[in-house]
Image (cartoon, rainbow, N blue to C red):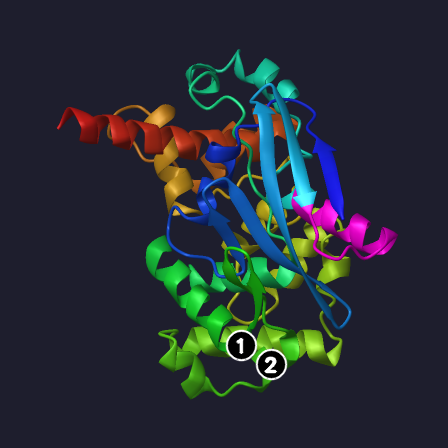
Amino acid sequence: MELTLAVDGPFDAAATLARYHRWGEDPATRLDGDVLRRVLRVGERLLPYEVRTSGTVTDARLTVTIPGGGGADVERAVTTEVRRLCGLDFDLPGFYRMAKGDPALAPLVEPLYGMRPTLAPTPLEMLIGSISAQQVNLSFAFACRARLVRRWGTPVATPGGDVYAFPTPPLLAAARLREYRALKFSTRKGEYIRDLARGVVRGTLDLDALTTAPSADVIATLTALRGLGRWTADWFLARCCGRGDVCPAGDLAVRKAFEHHYARRGRTLSEEAIRRRSRVWGEHQNLAIHYLLAGMRLHAAARGGEA
């Protein structure tokens, strides 16, 4: 089966998909050159597929190949997941119109034109990634998460090598803490992941329903879980639910980006001050944060080049 997805607005595939290798390997979402490979779980079936981009940034098309096909249900499921992986539902043209009036965002539009935030393919993957990233650098977090995927995920052969279906909640729920520690997770993080998986298995936590709940309910549900706080809830809203009016103001990198672009030299901004500042962007807060963070990487790269 082969599907072609048109993109509404610009799409820079290289800039958008760079997050799948920027901080390390993701065995569940493999990016090999310009080919993105994943395994879709449909009931008990594991269906590998690959995504290729053609055309220009202003006229991009995505071709999705699913060996063996699978019918209308598979087509819908793959289309939904690919749109998430590539951030296709974000309103970039609307954001750019707004950004032209912002002194920090306006200079970022041209060098980052077509870059989109990617969304986590599943809420479980998002939350385990967030737990992995607590109080450590992203390279170490990616390495821990990759070990978890290889330990309990299911490898599926593809033309580009094995791609892993993400581990199921029952497997994560049944694992022993010493197994998590062997993957370099702390005992606490092992407990958080296992508790999360057990909540899904027991039916006390419906992650799919959570993605469509009001933002206040999402925050309340996640912050009530052991080991998850407002930082995780905000990023879940932004990078799993794809909500536009979200600012993860408690994130250290976000705070540094705001201080770099908006604060007076040497001044620090409180979390509430960052939230107040971001509200002027309305439904484009999520995109604005993504561009400010990318702008910081551009700034760091430029300084490194000068050195």
* The magenta stretch spans residue 69: yes
Measuring 56% from the left and 21% from the top, which residue is drawn there? 56
- Of the pair 57 and 124, the residue shown nearer to us: 57
Measuring 59% from the left and 72% from the top, which residue is drawn there? 167
Q: Is residue 114 above or below residue 77?
A: above
Corner quadrant of residue 283 = top right
The answer, for residue 259, to whether it is visible in the render is no
Q: Is residue 170 above or below residue 261?
A: below
Labels 2 and 1: the sequence-earlier one: 1
For this view, does 300 lie left or right of residue 64? left
Q: Amino acid at mark 2?
A: Leu
Q: Is residue 178 above or below residue 262?
A: below
Label 1: which residue? 152
Corner quadrant of residue 103 = top left
Label 2: which residue? 171
Magenta stretch in the rendered image: 65-82
For this view, does 232 lie left or right of residue 75? left
Disc 2, disc 1: CB below 8 Å?
yes
Secondary structure that dominates the magenta span: helix
| Image location of residue 41, percent across then percent down | 70, 64
* The magenta stretch spans residue 142: no
| Image location of residue 131, percent across then percent down | 48, 64
- Of the pair 228 and 91, the residue shown nearer to us: 91
Q: Amino acid at mark 1?
A: Trp
Q: Nearer the viewer, mark 2 or mark 1?
A: 1
- Of the pair 71 and 151, the residue shown nearer to us: 71
The answer, for residue 87, to whether it is visible in the render is yes
Measuring 54% from the left and 60% from the top, which residue is drawn there? 28
